[in-house]
Amino acid sequence: MNRVSVMAVLVSFSLSALTGPLLIPFLRKIKCGQTVRDDGPAAHLKKTGTPTMGGLLILFSVVVTCLPFMGRYPKAAPVLFLTLGFGMIGFLDDYIKVVCRRSMGLTPIQKFGGQILVTAVFAFYLTHYTDVSLAMRVPFLQDTFLDLGIWNLPLLFFVVIGTVNGVNFTDGLDGLAGSVTAIVAVFFTVTAVGGRYGIEPVTCAVTGALLGFLLFNTHPASVFMGDTGSLALGGFVAACGYMMQMPLYIALVGIVYLAEVISVILQVGYYKISGGRRIFRMAPLHHHFELCGWSENKITAVFAIVTALMCLAALAAY
């Protein structure tokens, strides 16, 4: 690991750890409290009022850490853009819900439209202003790439938006999305440094910011990241995958995100087809295990361990 990588992790962690005690009381003061849905697990009702929008802490730490490196690492800019772009969509959604007191936040059309727009800007920059190809590295097949031609661009939109919403679904327990994504960020850091992809300032900054954020987000959480954080982290994961021509690897390192999305799709689909029956006790998947009697800490630990093992498998595949 080079000096820039180490510095980015330490600076971002310090910013996150030191800013948390300032931001959390401020969020509490302006009443940015989480509203827990009545149809969720009953144990979550005690979390009502916990400050949300803690994703601002992550974004602040990442941006401040990365900006000095942008001149030397231009390929980090698209990753930072997609992280910030989706983070801003999440911030608007959170702001409308908790500050403006509109429980629905952005409408589904507004949120999806924003995601399409941010992804389109990223895709345009990627294809017109970088030398990064949309051909995808195939896991376990060294120096083998899959090029789908005209289908590469539609697949990019599918992967980016699917990943973003997968991380969003994962953010349902204290420390879950943060722990899983910190491990994924370490994987991308190792790969970026080893392969000289030039995006390590962002991957290291996200790693450090998440480690600092988890000081306040582990159970019992004193702050939640909200959509501000979860959408931003989804953008980060998707952007890293594409800047290193590794979107297929997201299915490996992001196995938890994938499982969460699939559990929701299966639950909703089966509920409609069967006339009200369910596959899981509750979706997304982490709520199913919670209702099976697992503690939040156990679920977070198991999902993090699975992610770490899949990241090791992805390194072997690379």
Image (spheres, helix red, strand yellow):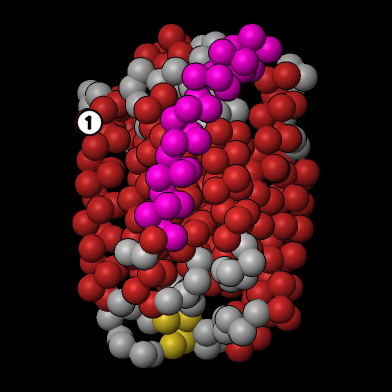
How far across and how far down the image is residue 256, in percent?
Answer: 36, 49
Judged from this view, the residue extending furthest toward the front is: 3
20 inside magenta stretch = yes
Residue at the image position 47 percent from the left and 43 percent from the top: 12
**In which quadrant of the rendered image does the N terminus lie?**
bottom left
134 and 293: which one is in front? Answer: 134
| Mark 1 neighbour density, 10 Å: few (under 14) some (14–19) many (20 or more) | few
Q: Is residue 52 left or right of residue 312?
A: right
What are the residue bounds of the magenta stretch? 4-32
Percent x, y of residue 112: 71, 49
- Seen in the image, is 27 located left or right of residue 173? right
Does 174 lie within the magenta span?
no
- Residue 286 pos. (x, y %): 35, 35
Residue nearest the viewer, comparing 160 with 37: 160
Q: Is residue 2 above or below residue 132?
A: above
| 285 displayed left or right of 206 | left
- Seen in the picture, residue 30 relative to 56 is either above or below; the reply is above
Tell me if residue 10 can be seen.
Answer: yes
Q: Is residue 133 left or right of residue 256?
A: right
Label 1 sits on residue? 298
Q: Find residue 248 and report its image quarter.
A: bottom left
Query: Residue at the spot x=23%, y=63% of the render?
Result: 312
Q: Quadrant of residue 213?
A: top left
Which one is nearer the viewer's eye here, 269 or 209?
Answer: 209
- Nearest the viewer among 158 and 268 is 158
Q: Quadrant of residue 64?
A: top right
- Identify the residue at image location x=35%, y=18%: 220
